[in-house]
Image (cartoon, rainbow, N blue to C red):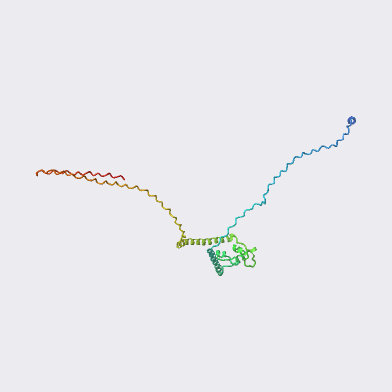
Amino acid sequence: MRRFALFAMSLGLTLGLSALGSAFAQDAKKDAPKPADAKPADAKPAETKPAETAKPADTKPADTTKPADAKPPEVPKAAAEAPLPTIPPEVEAKLEAARRAVAEAIVAAQDAGLVETSIDPPPVLDILITGRAIDARDLKAKRGVSPEVFGAWYTNYGKPMEGITATGDVRIVNPSKGLKEYYDTRAGILARHIDAVRKAKAAAAPKSAETKPAPKPADTPKPADTPKPAETKPADAPKPAESKPAAKPADAPKPAETKPADAPKPAADSKPAAKPADAKPADTKPADAKK
């Protein structure tokens, strides 16, 4: 009973206090003056537009003056290909002789039963290199053929053969199955014959040079004789007058001989006195005049 009474008392106090608190709160709300109905102003906040940034002035490049009738630059043309050299007559003669020799070799091989070909005319290289042409047998056995036979079939020079078509059956022989050996044989044969021809030509060159005299050079016209300048002899210097020696003066006349008067002859015994020697004047020759 006590517990129930205490519980009821506490519950009553709790409810009473809560009711009292709510009452005081309501009275406080009533006593407080109501504020005037302040309606929010219809003034809308000013729209703050971003300041317009000054647009840069349109700086267009100045119109460059176009040259009159401006043409695109011309692309330089490729240099013209040099013309093929002409075949000299002596080379053409040798080529014709070689063609004749090949034709004779083909006929000889056909007559000997060495040609079983599927093209017309027969393959030249096959006959010159291997001595025979058996491409028809190779096609029937589904083997490859030489490049010459292959090209002939694809350019309509193949003979009609049953069950054989160019696109379906004609193939070049594989290098490991005979093509490499074929070209090795070709190189060996041609190199041997070319070397022999060059040696023979080199050996014949000195003999032909010895037998043929060298052509004489054409007589070049002699240049005209240029007139020789007149010989200018120095003027003869006047010879000094020959100074002849002065003429010798005429011989002075000899003085007359004065003979002494005849003295009286002495006596016979006395001898006459000796005659005085004739006095000759001294030869006075003038001194030789200087030249």
**How many marks on residues?**
0
Q: Percent from the top left, x then y, of residue 109?
A: 55, 68
If the image is split into quadrants, where does the N terminus sit? top right
If the image is split into quadrants, where does the C terminus sit? top left
Of the pair 230 and 133, the residue shown nearer to us: 230
Of the pair 135 and 238, the residue shown nearer to us: 238
Q: Does residue 25 lie above or below 114 as drawn?
A: above
Q: Percent from the top left, x then y, of residue 203?
A: 47, 61
For residue 62, side relative to residue 182 (left or right): right
For residue 247, side relative to residue 8 (left or right): left
Task: Determine which quarter of the picture holds residue 124.
Answer: bottom right
Q: Does residue 102 lie above or below 288 as drawn?
A: below
Q: Percent from the top left, x then y, of residue 166?
A: 64, 64
Q: Percent from the top left, x then y, of residue 158?
A: 62, 66
Q: Does residue 252 lie above or below 32 as drawn?
A: below
Of the pair 2 and 47, the residue shown nearer to us: 47
Q: Does residue 261 lie above or below 37 as drawn?
A: below
Task: Determine which quarter of the picture holds residue 126.
Answer: bottom right
Q: Residue furthest bottom?
A: 111
Of the pair 147 and 223, the residue shown nearer to us: 223
